[in-house]
Image (spheres, coloured by chain):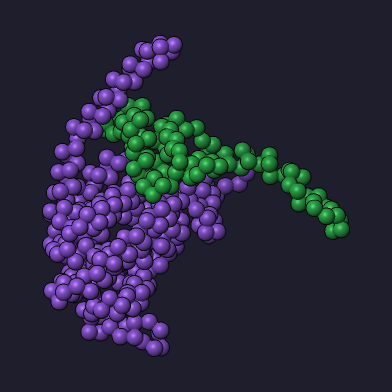
Chain colours: A purple, B green
Amino acid sequence: MTQAPGMDEHAVDEQRLLASFESTIGRHDRIEPRDWMPDAYRRTVIRQVAQHAHSEIIGMQPEGQWIGRAPTLRRKAILLAKVQDEAGHGLYLYSACETLGVSRTELTEMLIEGKQKYSSIFNYPALSYADVGTIGWLVDGAAICNQVPLCRTSYGPYGRSMIRICKEESFHQRQGFELLAMMMRGTDEQRAMVQESVDRFWWPALMMFGPPDDDSPNTAQSMAWGIKRNTNDDLRQRMVDMTVPQADALGVTLPDPDLKWNEERQSYDFGAPDWDEFKAVISGNGPCNTQRIAHRRRAHEDGAWVREAAMAFAASSSVERVETPEETR
Amino acid sequence: MTDVSGEWPLYEVFVRGKRGLNHVHVGSLHAADDEMAIRHARDVYTRRNEGVSIWVVRSSDVTASSPDEKDPLFAPSGDKVYRHPTFYEIPDNVPHM
């Protein structure tokens, strides 16, 4: 057996594993939890999936505040179902993330200690009831744009969570659009409320796709590994092209003087979001960052006794079960 | 299985979509005990009538084949092409086969 000098068996092994990993990615096959993967791939998927899970969990807050104030029983039931879905989506994603060897406790701690991020959009407040509609239409619309290609992401459990989430997400967008359409058929005051809400959410919704491609250091590697399938700017363009006709149908104006159809590109040209604002919000200085994390921390800490009591109950009833003879059960 | 963090144990969830289908793995969740795992599975994985039956099993009770041994484990079936119907040549004029 000849072996390159200085190359121990371990390094040869790792090269063989890396080659097999890369050929799986090259075939557009999925990576599954027990497969060998480079540490950097594992870290990148953990970061992205955790950030996604945290967004779902924090995302319950702006809309959750409106459940009690929604105007009818129908609207309350819809909103309740939607917020419950966000919780479910967070749980699918946390469990996908845990397959990579990080625990739920660690993930929750990283969120409440600010060591992992969540989508910048949830640091904006939901000030009026029209915001419930706008969040459904624009924020969930942007989320769908982002999530549909992720159904084909290279990490198996992440892709499977995304498929489940996408199926449920379309109800979220449609209920938002329907709510706004109904308000647009109402009074002048209601129409003004919708327009004011769209004015506030349009740019933050476009920021949801992340920084522009020339300022997105992780994109190239994430695309090479098949974790991401499209660049931030591609997805942003797709969102704009999808939304303009919807805004027309609704009768609202999108607050961008540069927005116009480009015949040559067969796409809309549009202005640049305020990237300084984006950076401020993701680094903790948005309107609601402190409040969102404080709320999540409080819920976690207030729930500690419930988690402990359930464990104690489970431990005591499993002792009883062992002690109960078979024939009396 | 005692977890130092006090975290509820992990369960794998399987749902039968409708009568006539197998239970299929849909994901996992944490619960303090088996009964709670079923309740949580209902809330997390069947909010839209996705199932008629749920199985839950502690993740630590699942025994799986090792991905490292994938080749030796599945190799014995790889060279037995005669187990597939396409291995046999049947004249074109023989119907229904």
Residue A280 x, y percent position in the rendering: 16, 65
| Residue at 83% over, 53% down | B89
Tell me the quarter of the picture where residue A211 sits: bottom left
| Residue at 37% over, 12% down | A324
- In which quadrant of the rendered image does the N terminus of chain A lie? top right
Q: Is residue A139 visible?
A: no
Residue B51 x, y percent position in the rendering: 44, 44
| Residue at 32% over, 40% down | A103
* B22 relative to A321, above or below: below
- In which quadrant of the rendered image does the C terminus of chain A lie? top left
Residue A136 x, y percent position in the rendering: 27, 63
Residue A257 x, y percent position in the rendering: 22, 84
Pick whichever, A98 or A164, lies toward us.
A164
Tell me the quarter of the picture where residue B78 sits: top right
Pick whichever, B40 or A316, lies toward us.
B40
* B70 relative to A237, above or below: above
Side of B86 where A1 appears, left or right:
left
Q: Is residue B80 visible?
A: yes
Side of A288 where B35 appears, left or right:
right
| Residue at 46% over, 59% down | A152
Pick whichever, A243 or A124, lies toward us.
A243
**Count of all numbered marks drawn on residues in the image:** 0
Side of A246 where A280 appears, left or right:
left
